[in-house]
Amino acid sequence: MTDVTADIDAMIARARKAQQSYEANGSQERFDRAAEAAAWALMEPNRNAELAAFAVAETGLGKIADKITKNHRKTLGLLRDIHGKTSFGLIDDDATSGVSEFLRPKGVVAAIVPSTNPLATPINNVVNALKTGNAIILAPSPKGAAPLAKLLEYVYAEFDRISLDHDLVQMVPNPPSKEKTARLMQGVDMLVVTGSQSNVRSAYSSGTPALGVGMGNVVTIIDETADLDEAAGKIARSKCFDNATSCSSENAVIVVDAVYDAFLQAIARAGGMCLDQDQTSHLINTHWHDGHLNRNMLAKDIDAVLDTLGFADAAPEGTKFLVAPAIAIGPDAPISGEKMALFFALYHASDFATAKEMAREIHAYQGRGHSLGLHSKDDNRARELAMDMQACRIIVNQAHCFATGGSFDNGLPFSLSMGCGSWGGNSIDDNLNWTHFVNHVRIARPIAPVEPTVDEMFADYFKASKQVGV
């Protein structure tokens, strides 16, 4: 047995012992206090500011002020979602069916977390795990390891205030490695994987039940009924937030021809620098190299992006992001994929039906199942997208990166991990939330038989088949 294997196995054993005690002595009140303790470890304002600055310094991704906002709002929203929810023990006694339903923890959960959100994502997972009576082990990316380790110091400080075992929340020892993560995946009871698709695939092949999420490559459609300045403003806020680290930032915008020229003016007013063909070609050749994204542009401030591209002198005053007109879609057109930088591809379509097919083609290349944006005053368009497209979320008239993972002004659960259903190769199609961290136990008692006749069950079929002459 290697030292790595022994270390990970020992960590899992400690987590399992802590979880068994946590559950055996557990109550809804105790689980709720534990979840709140973990949340406060990040939300306490001084810690939040310190950790956000540390995360940006270590990863080189995002903006400090936006990470502070994200850490606060995502965690506060999660607390709102779980407040008052029964996540342990009896939840239903149905006298008619004779079935009683109970909720129990999964056991020891492992969460693989990305460098883009090295604080908000792990705390989201920790809060959900503790709310439901689980222990959790976190496996960060190498760049996110130091900020997460510091965060766990604050988690433990809060645990000490309410007498909780530190082993309920652990982190893979530094430095993180594929070997450590692979061993962790094999030894726990459930996996939650956010980040690279290679990690998701590894989780699915580990033999452990896994909740993986798909690739984001958000496409937003703007139709002829949209309020263009409102749409442009929301797209700008979404694209610029945390320098586009979110998988829910707009990566492509498709505008119908009837309002295309007017939208160009609106997006310029919102801070977009609209590139010409030569500038777009230069951007593409600069940002993509052998399938990798340019780290000098990846989630960097707009000044760094402009300097890298040599566009600083040409950029209008007040430029916040770049708009790159595009035509091609697919593997030979990387601009139609995920970018994680302060620009998006702009397509135009003759009408809504054409825009829809273009969005379908983009998602077939990257992002299928994740989400689709729509700016329109016609709600029937949203319903049409829901039935015709392979996207698990249709985000209407909202800043996409704020809305997709839950918002205080929409009804989606707060989360940083969005399931993409079968279309994205995932086992879940909703926002990862506490309900995914429990096992359901049902007591079934004998009741009076409820057995229909064959004629009752086939009456409609027999009637229909006679009508068509079968």
Image: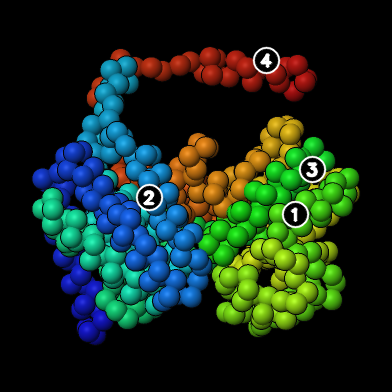
Taking the view exactly as shown, the residue that stands out farthest to the front is: 317
Q: Nearer the viewer, residue 59 or 364?
A: 59
Q: Is residue 175 left or right of residue 381?
A: left
**Considering only order in the chain, which callout, 4 or 2, is on the residue closer to the N terminus?**
2
Does the rendering let one see residue 444?
A: no
Residue drawn at 50 percent across, 52 percent down: 418
Determine the image quadrant of residue 219.
Answer: bottom right
Across and down, in percent, residue 333 comes to 76, 71
Foreground: disc 1 or disc 4: 1
Determine the image quadrant of residue 53.
Answer: bottom left
Residue drawn at 70 percent across, 46 percent down: 231
**Considering only order in the chain, which callout, 3 or 4, is on the residue closer to the N terminus?**
3
Which residue carries the number 4 mark? 463
What amino acid is found at the position of numbered circle 2 in the picture? Thr
Residue drawn at 76 percent across, 57 percent down: 268
Q: CA distance from mark 2 to mark 1?
A: 33 Å
Residue 456 drawn above or below residue 148? above
Which residue carries the number 3 mark? 223
What amino acid is found at the position of numbered circle 3 in the picture? Asp
Which residue carries the number 1 mark? 269
Describe the element under mark 3 as helix, strand or loop. Answer: loop
Residue drawn at 41 percent across, 18 percent down: 451
**Considering only order in the chain, which callout, 1 or 3, is on the residue closer to the N terminus?**
3
